[in-house]
Amino acid sequence: MKIQCRFFASVREALNETDETLELPATVHTVGDVRNYLRERGGVWEEVLGEGRALRMAYNQVMTTPDTPITADCEVAFFPPVTGG
């Protein structure tokens, strides 16, 4: 399955990536699985997307949770929590 990943703010800066098209293995079914799949790259990917890190996720531009199922050609985005004043 092919999806589009987008990275924003400090996540984008740390990964030095804005977006990426991914061809996922059949074992990846949810937004959380995408996060784990990317973490397996190690290094900065594990650091930025690691377990326990404050991280927001969106599925097709809607805030979501790790258990949200993904579909072919969807968009999954990762970004830090945002605060306003």
Image: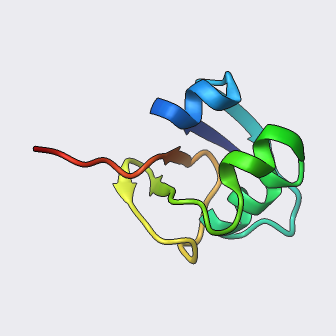
Q: Is residue 8 visible?
A: no
In the image, residue 58 sits, relative to residue 68, either above or below, namely above
Quarter of the image with the C terminus in it: top left
Whether residue 60 sits left or right of residue 21 in the image: it is left
Q: Colour scheme of this structure image? A: rainbow
Q: Nearer the viewer, residue 63 or 49?
A: 49
Q: Nearer the viewer, residue 9 or 63?
A: 9
Residue plotted at (89% across, 47% down): 42
Whether residue 58 sits left or right of residue 66 in the image: it is left
x then y, percent, for residue 40 = 88, 54
Which residue is farthest front? Answer: 85
Residue plotted at (31% across, 47% down): 82
Residue plotted at (66% across, 24% down): 17
Q: Nearer the viewer, residue 14 or 66?
A: 14
x then y, percent, for residue 66 = 57, 71
Q: Is residue 23 visible?
A: yes
